[in-house]
Amino acid sequence: MLSQESLAKIDRELTKYPADHRQAAVMSALRIAQDEKGWLSKDTVAFVAEYLGIPPIAALEVASFYNMYELEPVGQYKITVCTNISCMLRDSDVIVDHLQERLGIGFNETTPDGKFTLKEGECMGCCGGAPLFHINNKRMCEFLTKEKVDAILEELK
Amino acid sequence: MAAFDTPVQHRSDKEALVCLRTLGQPDPASLQAYLNVGGYKQLQRLVQDKVKATDVITQVKLSGLRGRGGAGFPTGLKWSFMPRYYDGTKYLVCNTDEGEPGTFKDRDIIRYNPHQLIEGMAIAAYTLGARVGYNYIHGEIWQDYEIFERALDEARAAGFIGENLFNTTFSFDLYAVHGYGAYICGEETALIESIEGKKGQPRFKPPFPASYGVFGKPTNVNNTESYTSIPWILEHGGDAFQALGVPNSGGTKLFSVSGHVERPGNYEVRMGMPFTELLDIAGGVWKGRQLKAVIPGGPSTAVMPAAAIMGATMDYDGLSKAGSSLGAGSMIVMDETTCMVKTLKRLSYFFYEESCGQCTPCREGTGWLYRVVKRIVEGEGRMGDLDLLTDVSSNISGRTICALGDAAATPVLSFIKHFRPEFEYYIQHGKSMVTGKAE
């Protein structure tokens, strides 16, 4: 259900916790599973739970509580734009409008070719670089202008 | 990595670097950079000379260091709450879970000077008898989390964390834990739940983490900046750290400056710096505009009109005398073009979205606050709405397990208190007094 590479990563996370607290690794295990699959289906969540030896509901509770897990399919590139106050004051509205126009989609939508999904995020704790977004929960892009957004979209094409 | 990902760093000679003291070196996050400024020498001295825990705590108390995560609780006093004798594993936790809008200082510590945090935690572990530590880093900063993981590998290989350090019986294992998007996990007991692999819902206190923390064991939780100050304090003495600041606010403080300034970023300065000087370091209000308002410590601290903050100093007492508080030092600057009604709407949405849903007054109340501010912004406001907002806020405050409820009420109460005419205008005219437009 998950690749050997992903399982090895989960095993490394398990070494951080006492042997009788395997549930502690569920946050990172779900993150690793999502990195491989793109999103977390019910089956993937259940597999992670079984691997850790915890009830499926315990893993689903975590997957549905934290914002960065995706319980529905998303595009190849998920762009999450912060619109909170520090970004708003530095015109995140302009970045959002530009992205929506360029991609032809609104928040929580995916382009027909399955390439891009757009999400609105809450504060990412990087407000000095506002306005900003991150891609696939991994890569932070800061000090955005329309031109930088165009360059990033071009690179991901 | 492409150029647009590269952070821009602005520095000023008015800064006093304690937590960011490796800045200026070619690779400030490396072990070598930290060794170049005398890194890990304090840990080695304490462990090899078997310095007594009480002596370490005395220095931390003398330093005047107060919790840098926002609560401002004296760190030395907190350390003295940990049980000295305990038959089992004690834990140490670092809170690098920034997510309150405007707060981004701890990110710069882990990406520019992670080893000083590691040494600070190892010193705390030695002092408190903790065997295992976790640094909980919020989910959105993956690249910085990886920098910290690399620093841990370096520290392990060099023998600064792990088994039998410096050939003594002292052992300390330290791990990085990655959050995945929940502001509430900045609350220390929610963070502990999250480390255990659960939803981040705060625990009822007491018992406090010092007696019942991670996996039910005694646990000391401090903020990143607090731990990172420790090696400097032990090198120079608690008195020297206190002397960097002002009475009741010892040391330096990292201020995260965002919003309408020319040079947003983190600036580490002495406590007690006049607000105007800090604003100047950040380049002043952008585009030559006038200052309208400042949130000095993150949205859970009261907004201050320009007139109230211009004469204030940036320390615990200075900001509290001026009508707000220092919080985490997250200074959000707003210029004259800012519509306070629209700004409050965004903040209210944040607290509504981030309420963990455990306590009814917060879960339901934050929804009410957001919906009422939203209808004002959409031109559907009623004259009774301002009283309604005040009433709902007052009924959330003090009626929840954790402080998120109070944090949600603070912006509502302070925005209406200081900018009431703007809210009344919006309700009467269905559009913003500042921009002349409706949403």
Image: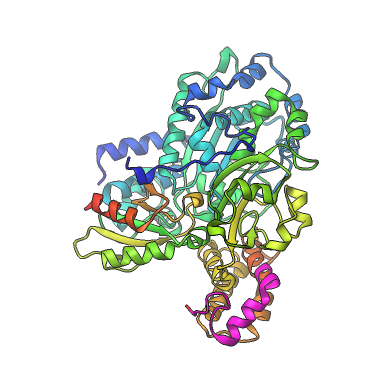
* Residue visible at 61% across and 59% down in the picture: B299
Q: Is residue B217 visible?
A: no
Q: Quadrant of residue B412?
A: bottom right
Magenta stretch prevailing secondary structure:
helix
Magenta stretch holds residue B280: no
Drawn side of residue B153 relative to residue B331, left or right: left
* Residue visible at 66% across and 52% down in the picture: B327
Please tell me whether residue B9 is drawn above or below residue B361 in the rendered image: above
> x and y percent of residue B2 in the render?
32, 42
**How is the rendered protein coloured?**
rainbow
Instruction: Name the residue at the front extreme.
Output: B288
> x and y percent of residue A93 in the render?
42, 65
Drawn side of residue B101 relative to residue B397, left or right: left
Q: In which quarter of the image is residue B408?
A: bottom right
> x and y percent of residue B184 in the render?
55, 55
* Residue visible at 67% across and 76% down in the picture: B420
Please tell me whether residue A10 is drawn above or below residue A100 in the rendered image: above
Camera-side residue of B409 and B170: B409
Q: Quadrant of residue B310?
A: bottom right
Drawn side of residue B211 relative to residue B320, left or right: left
* Residue visible at 69% across and 29% down in the picture: B233
Region in magenta? B414-438
Camera-side residue of B20 and B338: B338
Q: Is residue A98 visible?
A: yes
Magenta stretch holds residue B419: yes
> x and y percent of residue B189 in the render?
60, 49
Camera-side residue of B160 and B376: B376
